[in-house]
Image (tube, helix red, strand yellow):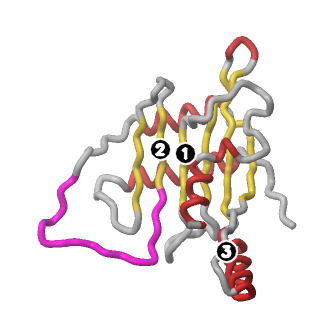
Amino acid sequence: MLHARAWHTLKHSFDLPPSASGGRPFHGIPRLCLWDDATGFRSDNPQPFTLSVFEIFGDNLSRHSVVREAVWQRHDDLEKLHRKVERKRKVIFWEPTFVIRDGPVPAAEFRALLKEATAFRVPVVWLGPEDRESVTTDVGDLGFEFFSREQPPAVLRLQWSFEMPESWPPIVDWFEKMRNFLVGCLPAANHP
């Protein structure tokens, strides 16, 4: 239950205070959302996170992109929940906790990275060997969603884990490049 609530909140991070809009008109649908569930041996991220790029409307209806990083403090939440359950010896409901950082996204660089992704050719379905099926554990997943500006938007979601279609490595490389760019747009993290 905790995991489901946390992921719902991560995917809807615009609801978390403080407002990502800075008081400007704002629509809750992101243009782009990257995530990593931070599970498994391959993750270099200690906590699950999303990076969502929202458009904020400024003067004269100009648009300004803002990136919001939402990080679920999973390790701390699970440790505190475990201690509380051991003490009380009953079912406990726990609200997940998050760390939020927002930062402005330079329009030209962001557009250039998006333009780079327009060159990808991704099959909508792919056929693997008929005699092989992969089952993995402790691997987790990461991916991204792109939302068009139309309402309702057209949405493309790509998610992968340890195994992925053979045509996807350039997409995974682009994901890492976009993630590094967006993280570089954020202010330094406040560590207690």
Q: Is residue 151 above or below residue 165?
A: above
Which class describes the residues within 10 Å of circle 3: few (<14), some (14-19), or many (20+)? few
Residue at 66%, 32% in the rendered image: 65
Residue 145's disc number: 2
Find residue 153 and report its image quarter: top left
Residue at 84%, 59% in the rendered image: 190
Q: Nearer the viewer, mark 2 or mark 3?
A: 3
State how far apart marks 2 and 1 are (Cα). Answer: 5 Å
Mark 3 in CB contact with mark 1 (< 8 angstroms):
no
Residue tagged 1: 33
Find residue 75 and report its image quarter: bottom right
Task: Indicate the secondary structure of the residue bearing disc 3.
Answer: loop
Residue at 64%, 67% in the rendered image: 47
Q: Earlier in the sequence, mark 2 or mark 3?
A: 3
Mark 2 in CB contact with mark 1 (< 8 angstroms):
yes
Mark 2 in CB contact with mark 3 (< 8 angstroms):
no
Estimate the x, y position of residue 191 in percent, counting from the top left. 84, 64
State left or right for residue 7 relative to residue 153: right
State how far apart marks 3 and 1 are (Cα). Answer: 31 Å
Q: Which residues are magenta?
A: 126-142
Q: Earlier in the sequence, mark 2 or mark 1?
A: 1
10 and 47: which one is in front? 10
Q: Earlier in the sequence, mark 3 or mark 1?
A: 1
Q: Is residue 99 above or below residue 121?
A: below
Task: Indicate the secondary structure of the residue bearing disc 1.
Answer: strand
* Amino acid at circle 1: Cys
